[in-house]
Image (tube, rainbow, N blue to C red):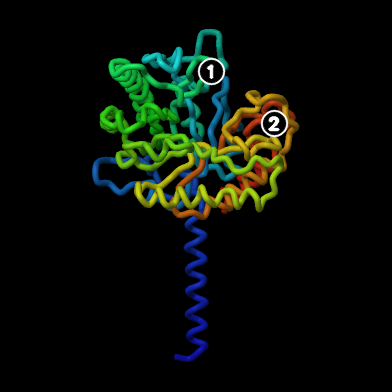
Amino acid sequence: MPVSTLLLGFRALCVLLAGTLAIAVRCEQPAAQQAGTSNTTFRNSGPGQENPLTSVPGRMCGVNWVGGDSITAADLEPLRLANVTWLAQTPFGWQNGPNEPVVHMRTTAGKGRYRDWGESDAGLAYTARLARQQGIRTLLKPHIWVRGRGAWPGDINMQSTADWDAWFASYTTFILHYARLAEAQQMEALCLGTELQHATTAAHARQWRGLIRQVRRVYRGQLTYAANWSGEYQQVPFWRELDFVGIQAYFPLTSWPSPPLDTLLRAWQPHVRALAAWQRRVGKPIVFTEVGYKATPDAAARPWEWPERQAGPLPADEATQARCYEAFFRACWPQPWLKGVFIWKWYPGLQASGPARQHADFTPQHKPAERVMRHWYGQ
């Protein structure tokens, strides 16, 4: 065969591979821009249907949305400009303590209290409808708020079998309420829980599988669970019953203040290798249901830690936050097992001159980190 023919064939192969790689990391095209696509593109119609998460090309390019006292289309326009295609909405249930076997719900905004409207059923539904008009899909992601200083869902742990049975019965009522809401509003995905590490051990596999069966009867969209990065995601016994794995990806990187990019990239490598090896065993795509960094010099040390819980105030360091974003996307975005990301977090209507607290916390808005996110989400 002539050398010229070989060269032409080689060039054609390179073009094909380059196109394949570009498709592999591209975000989902917004639903409103998909020709001939209905609002139910990401919904199952019955057993045996092809999993839409893997059949639709692209990634879930998401943010975790903060519920406000109102919302307009103008509040969602910055998401579209930032190439965001998904948002996660977070209604809360409450427990009076980590050993309390009752989950309390408030599904309407409190009388005379408008600050929680965005977490009410009416606010969640309105936000999802408005987002859909912008071509943005919704992951409904209920959380449990545990009362008590410093408490978090990972502290929930019952003291007896009877208490665990009571807790699962109460929690099932809580989740089924949001499953029905998600179905009624055609929300494309539902998260069954977040960081409930004592409840997701093998000892409770039967209760979770029963809950999943009940949810599947009333909700046809995609199901996930958001497991903590620190050991929990490896122990969850019911991943195969879900559509994708959710991980709260606050992996620590380095204790150095204001670390350089190459240090951050090296620090990601062991986490990437461990995730890749584990994902091959579980056989489900991974979505980082939360990942984020504060705009502080220590952003890479304990990424899960809120600024106000630190020993003292730290100076704003937006450059470090942006480098953490860049390192994350460079290390993780090309990985074939990663099917999506939800950045923590996004305030509707946040102005560039907003409160200093919000500009020191996790949001990338009006900071260099937002440009990094927009660039990678727009690949």
In the visual, does 216 lie left or right of 319?
left
- Tally of marks: 2
The residue pinned by badge 2 equals 359
Residue 143 x %, y %? 45, 25
Q: Amino acid at mark 1?
A: Asp
Residue 263 x %, y %? 65, 50
Q: Residue at x 37, y 14 (%)?
A: 102
Q: Is residue 122 visible?
A: no
> Mark 2: few, some, or many residues within 10 Å (few <14, many ≥20)?
many
In the visual, does 165 lie left or right of 114?
left
Name the outermost residue toward the top.
Answer: 111
Q: Residue at x 57, y 40 (%)?
A: 252
In the visual, does 236 lie left or right of 111?
left
Q: Residue at x 51, y 36 (%)?
A: 87
Name the outermost residue toward the left.
Answer: 47
Quadrant location of the N terminus in the rendered image: bottom left
Q: Which of these two is toward me, 328 or 46?
A: 328
Work out whether 309 lies above or below 52.
above
Work out whether 379 lies above or below 358.
below
In three-dimensional space, the C-alpha distance between marks 2 and 1, rounded to whole angstroms, equals 21 Å
> Mark 1: few, some, or many residues within 10 Å (few <14, many ≥20)?
many
Q: Residue at x 32, y 19 (%)?
A: 164
N-term-proximal mark, 2 vs 1: 1
Q: Is residue 145 visible?
A: yes
